[in-house]
Image: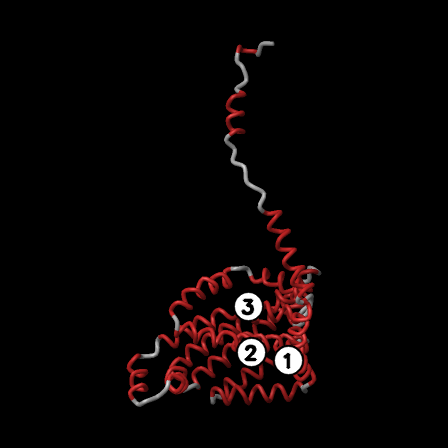
């Protein structure tokens, strides 16, 4: 049957477009299935090891958290004010530290802030135990640095909440996966700046130590580490800030604290609650940042 106007439909062009449309192989399904199989194998075959790690972390976290939460608020205020004065030797700095903590208590978030502070302290301690030796090894070995650097780039480019997925699968919900995810997310700056600080130590100082008969350990302990200490403390500062930034993300898997307040405000469409939690995190970040900077300036 003819078409009005004597024209025929241009079906050939549609066919050509369909023929040349690229097709993608289905790699997503086998990748998902293999990943789930690997995680299931780890959980079933190494469940006791994961449980031992959880027990060790809780043994470190729970007493610290209980001590911070049970300590009188006035004692914490006086202690942190005294610490601020000792670090800076300035009463204005010490009073500002105490005022910041008082403001957190006035917002009704003292207990939540102590929970978050305990989690951050444990995460920073573990990051220091992991990042400092790796940074030392990277400073001594160029080959290791070439291997570690892409891994650090990957750890810093992956979105922070992605770390919660494997941690929650292997360790369940709660504070333990939150600590581990925080450590993975916050360790790279410490590794990088430790490596950088040690490599920036003048060769003249190292050669002088060698000429005096110092061993490699003595050179590291008495020359390289003291001269690289400002850079290491800067890395520790960034690690602490990134650990505190994970507080809100970690609340998604059951880690309580100030992050839970922010998450509650988002879930309930309550901007006031979210604002209160956000202000507490900001004040905690300022206090930690200024105290660590003062410690870096106090270091020889």
Q: Position of residue 96 (x, y in %)?
A: 54, 82
Q: Position of residue 85 (x, y in %)?
A: 51, 89
Write down the quadrant of residue 81 in the picture. Answer: bottom right
Nearest the viewer among 225 and 210 is 210
Q: Position of residue 247 (x, y in %)?
A: 61, 69
The residue indicated by pointer 3 is: 184
**254 up-or-down from 136: above or below:** above
Sooner in the amino-acid sequence: mark 1 or mark 3:
1
Cα distance between the residues tagged 2 and 1: 10 Å
Sooner in the amino-acid sequence: mark 2 or mark 1:
1
Using the rendered image of the protein, determine whether residue 85 is visible from the camera's viewpoint. yes
Nearest the viewer among 49 and 109 is 49
Label 3 residue SS = helix
Whether pointer 2 and pointer 1 mark residues with C-beta atoms closer than 8 Å, the reply is yes
Cα distance between the residues tagged 2 and 3: 12 Å
Label 1 residue SS = helix
Label 2 residue SS = helix
Q: How many numbered badges does the structure rendering display?
A: 3
**227 up-or-down from 19: above or below:** below
Q: Position of residue 134 (x, y in %)?
A: 47, 73
Write down the quadrant of residue 261 in the picture. Answer: bottom right
How many neighbours does mark 2 have within 10 angstroms: few (below 14), some (14-19), or many (20 or more)?
some
Q: Which mark is residue 207?
A: none
Q: Residue at x 55, y 78 (%)?
A: 125
Quadrant where the N terminus sits is top right
Give the colouring mode of the picture. secondary structure
Q: Which mark is residue 125?
A: 2
The residue indicated by pointer 1 is: 60
């Amino acid at each position: 049957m003819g078409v009005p106007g004597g024209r025929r439909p241009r079906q050939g062009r549609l066919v050509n477009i369909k023929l040349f449309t690229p097709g993608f192989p289905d790699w997503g399904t086998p990748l998902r299935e293999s990943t789930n199989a690997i995680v299931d194998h780890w959980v079933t075959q190494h469940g006791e090891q994961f449980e031992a790690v959880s027990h060790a972390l809780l043994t470190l976290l729970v007493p610290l958290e209980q001590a911070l939460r049970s300590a009188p608020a006035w004692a914490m205020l006086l202690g942190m004010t005294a610490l601020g004065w000792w670090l800076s030797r300035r009463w204005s700095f010490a009073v500002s530290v105490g005022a910041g903590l008082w403001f957190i208590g006035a917002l009704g978030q003292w207990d939540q802030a102590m929970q978050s502070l305990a989690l951050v302290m444990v995460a920073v301690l573990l990051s220091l135990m992991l990042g400092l030796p790796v940074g030392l090894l990277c400073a001594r070995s160029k080959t290791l640095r070439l291997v570690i650097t892409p891994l650090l780039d990957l750890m810093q480019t992956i979105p922070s909440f992605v770390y919660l997925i494997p941690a929650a699968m292997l360790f369940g919900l709660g504070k333990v996966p939150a600590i581990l995810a925080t450590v993975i997310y916050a360790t790279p700056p410490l590794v990088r700046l430790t490596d950088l600080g040690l490599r920036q130590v003048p060769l003249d100082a190292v050669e002088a130590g060698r000429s005096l008969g110092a061993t490699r350990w003595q050179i590291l302990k008495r020359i390289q580490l003291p001269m690289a200490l400002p850079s290491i403390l800067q890395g520790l500062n960034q690690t602490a800030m990134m650990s505190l930034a994970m507080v809100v993300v970690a609340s998604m898997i059951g880690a309580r604290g100030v992050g839970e307040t922010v998450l509650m405000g988002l879930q309930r469409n309550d901007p006031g609650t979210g604002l209160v939690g956000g202000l507490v995190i900001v004040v905690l970040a300022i206090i930690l940042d200024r105290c660590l900077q003062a410690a870096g300036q106090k270091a020889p």
